Amino acid sequence: MLPDEPPSARPYDPRGEARRQFAAAVALPEPEIDVARAALWLAAEADPRAEVDRHLERLDALGEAARAGVEAAADAAEAVAHLNHVLFERERFRGNEHDYYDPRNSFLGDVLDRRRGIPITLSIVYVEVARRAGLEAHGVGFPGHFLAKVVDRDGGAIVVDAFHGRVLTRDACAERLRGALGPQAVLADEHLAAASAHQTLRRMLTNLKQIHLQRRQLDAALACVDRILLLAPDDALELRDRGLLYQALECFAPAIDDLERFLALAPGDASAPRVERVLAQLRERAPKLH
């Protein structure tokens, strides 16, 4: 038997390296996770030409461009107005309403280059630039439409819709909540709570997964689920979805493993009977495979 090849002798695998870098980024303790870096490595798996360091430098430059005006502002509202001017008027970042479901809208590097994106990626740009300019800013996992917020000295928050490039009042947030959840929905502080790094990255991957499923891009959807499970290893529904994707891709052994684990974790889920039928078919077929 030949010895294993030394790592230096193996061909460079940019997609594998992007996955490894993403896994390392999200394995850090929550407060230490760099969302921008993780999001850029997420994108690099889809496009090996992605330049993570260049795009981090672009965020640094945008933050530096806004810093003087932010520091000179009399209060948080004035600072936000200046930051909005820099990003939405001078740099012309805006939502891609023309082609909302273009996968590139979920790739932070593409968003920085094209200045077009969806609510979550534009909110990440906003938060990262705001922090570099000296503000306390967070993403907000608002139902239906990811937002950003800047915290003022008194602990209050100014909420920003980075997709449309404007500040939202509390009444406007309440109206949006009713649009997303129904007319009986009542806005609470929890709806405007800061999203964690894991929550933000998971929402990005879930959006991208749905886009790939709609396009029947099963390998790409599987890659999204793999990374969601790096964030939440025991998520039963994601294990189910990965098992079904493996089945569709005719990878039957891992499909069986994931579907069995799903049933162990969530035996009472509404989809469990269908999964049991799929498993029975896979087990019947497995002994015939060589």
Image: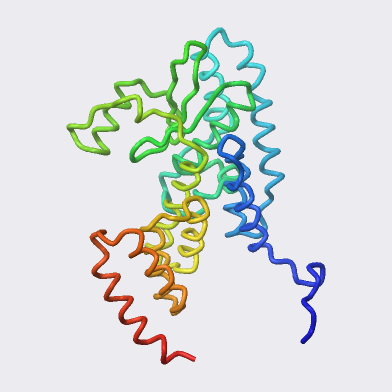
Image quadrant holding the N terminus, namely bottom right
Q: Between 149 and 16, which is closer to the camera in this rendering?
A: 16
Relative placement, left or right, of 94 versus 264 is right
Image-quadrant location for residue 115? top right
- So how many labels did they put on this image? 0
Is 182 above or below relative to 187? below
Q: Residue at x 69, y 32 (%)?
A: 61
Determine whether 192 is above or below 42 in the image.
Answer: above
Q: Position of residue 204 (x, y in %)?
A: 47, 48
x, y (%) of residue 88? 52, 30
Q: Residue at x 33, y 21 (%)?
A: 170
Residue 231 picture location, percent across and down: 50, 50
Q: Nearer the viewer, residue 105 or 191?
A: 191
Residue 95 to residue 259: above or below:
above
Q: Nearer the viewer, residue 275 or 40?
A: 275
Q: Position of residue 71 (x, y in %)?
A: 63, 14
Against 228, residue 134 (above or below) is above
Specify whether 153 is left or right of 7: left
List the single residue furthest toward the front.
264
